[in-house]
Image (spheres, rainbow, N blue to C red):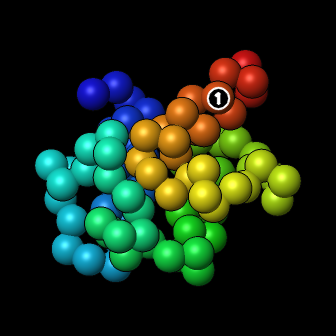
Amino acid sequence: MDEVDAKLRGIIIKNAQKNVTENDINEDSILDHDFGIDSVVMIMVIIDLENTFAITIKDEDINLSTLKEYRYLKQFVNAKLSTAE
């Protein structure tokens, strides 16, 4: 597990509306179904992403259907980090 993955898992655990451990999170996890992260909670996740990774996420960057799975959220963060350098 790399640093981005570890921090991202921490954000998911912090915002999950269900009891979640690090071991519960995998690439195929669906954020709303598995962790109770609906569109309202996703706003808090996005704020945490911005603060944790020092990235800016614009409204046009957000596509909730794309960000509904853990793997896509991780890809999104990695892409934002690579363009921020």
Left or right of 24 in this view: 72: right
**Residue at screen point 44% across, 33% down:** 4
Task: Decide if residue 7 is in sight here.
Answer: yes
The quadrant the C terminus occupies is top right
**Residue at screen point 56% across, 68% down:** 42
Q: Amino acid at mark 1?
A: Ala
Which quadrant would residue 1 be assigned to in this image?
top left
Q: Is residue 82 above or below residue 66?
A: above
**Residue at screen point 33% across, 40% down:** 27
Q: Position of residue 32 (x, y in %)?
A: 42, 70
Report the front residue among 38 and 56: 38
**Residue at screen point 20% across, 74% down:** 19
SS at badge 1: helix
Q: Position of residue 73 (x, y in %)?
A: 52, 45
Left or right of 65 in this view: 25: left
Left or right of 60 in this view: 34: left
Q: Is residue 37 above or below residue 83?
A: below
Residue on which the image places disc 1:
79
Which quadrant would residue 17 be assigned to in this image?
bottom left
- Total count of labels: 1
Neighbourhood count class around disc 1 (C-alpha, 10 Å): few under 14, some 14–19, many 20 upward: few
Q: Position of residue 2 (x, y in %)?
A: 34, 25
Task: Decide if residue 51 is in sight here.
Answer: no
Left or right of 5 in this view: 80: right
Report the front residue among 40 and 13: 40
Report the front residue among 84 and 79: 79
